[in-house]
Image (cartoon, rainbow, N blue to C red):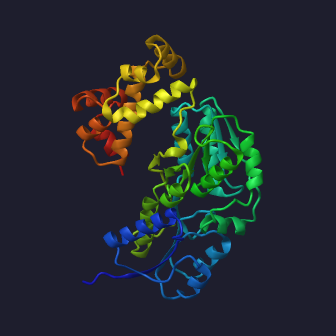
Amino acid sequence: MTQKSYRVAVFVETSRGYGRGLCEGIADFAQCNGNWMFKGGGESWKKGIAGIAGKVDGVIARIPDDEMAGALSRLGVPVVDLYRWREYPRIATVDADHGAIGRMAAAWFIERRFRHFAFCGYHSAPFSNLRGAAFKETAEQAGFTCSVYEASRFKPDFLGKLILQAEAYGDPPDSRRLARWLKTLPVPTAILCCHDIRAYQVIAVCKELGLDVPRDVAVMGVDNDRILCGFAYPMLTSVDPDAHQIGWTGAAMLHERLTRAGRAVRRALIAPSRIVERASTATDPVAPQWLADALRFIRKEIPAGVNAEEVIRHVGRSHTLVERAFVKALGNTVHQEIARLRLREACRLLQETDHPASEVARLAGFSSPQYFNRLFCGEFGLPPAAYRHRHFR
């Protein structure tokens, strides 16, 4: 029996990494699970929708306003929205878990001992508000304050285009307002921006103000757009929201409705996968400066199996002075801080690579896989393989 084929239109921007990730997830699902033919679609939805009426069985789209939602609803076919600017009764939604993104970013900065936090986004953009609120709440629950940029009020249609289309790499439309806010922040401050282009803009304005990134201001974006992150100088640290999984889940949701396996309009949120660390956050907000230099030396030399004596020789100060400074500022001896950073690096490798545990142990500077396994189990209550199974996607 020949499998029924379905005609699907996709209205998702491909000008930025997030949209391309969504499309890759949709395409991978179609290759593995659906006999789909893609019809029409693209970024210009007004022209695209006019050409697909009566010619498609379903639609996956990023819906920025009521006008597009109404036009898609009038097609009379199942629709899945991957934007969720607003929820519509007859349109299913799959979106990033914006609260989880904000909490992940705040926890990451807190673990690196930042004490001052800030969030920069867009006024009245739902995804930005959710990320900022969660970031601020997490920082405040840990006993810190968080400044939130009071962004300029853009009209909803302008803001939708600004977010869904490729912004220019020049000055943001609110650069003067943004500069005034940045000058009020204490040094050093950890800033989460609502997405990578906003982070790119913040870094550009910091340069104009003479603020050093990352020493004065550590900047993190969201989307892990490799082009934007690479264009930023220093290169931008970013939260990976797992766009591929969002696209895959949206395609699976549409497939359920097309095949009558599930008729209900469903909503789904996808957790972020990881934080990709780059130079824009490569700093340690501790004093004196030689202590920050010591921590950078440890991170650099972790694969070589650095030990406490090598760190003390590197900073050129007495054993007693170095140990006291570590305990006072970090709460750890030099040896304990090395072990902590090794375990952190091992966790990153387990989540981001498919290296066997023995190779992870070597790259994280452990003397043997057995010692690594014992220390890891003692810290996390489960062996490295189980940790990877829980976190790796």
Q: Is residue 348 left or right of residue 14?
A: left
Q: Residue at x 31, y 33 (%)?
A: 304
Q: From this viewpoint, is residue 343 visible?
A: no
Above or below: residue 367 compared with residue 88 = above
Above or below: residue 5 compared with residue 265 = below
Q: From this viewpoint, is residue 183 visible?
A: yes
Quarter of the figure with the N terminus: bottom left
Q: Nearer the viewer, residue 316 or 179?
A: 316
Q: Residue at x 43, y 63 (%)?
A: 249
Furthest residue toward front: 316
Q: Position of residue 336 (x, y in %)?
A: 40, 21
Q: Nearer the viewer, residue 183 or 254?
A: 183
Q: Position of residue 326 (x, y in %)?
A: 49, 19
Q: Is residue 160 left or right of residue 95?
A: right
Q: Position of residue 100 (x, y in %)?
A: 53, 47
Q: Position of residue 108 (x, y in %)?
A: 51, 38
Q: Quadrant of residue 74?
A: bottom right
Numbered label tally: 0
Q: Residue at x 47, y 51 (%)?
A: 271
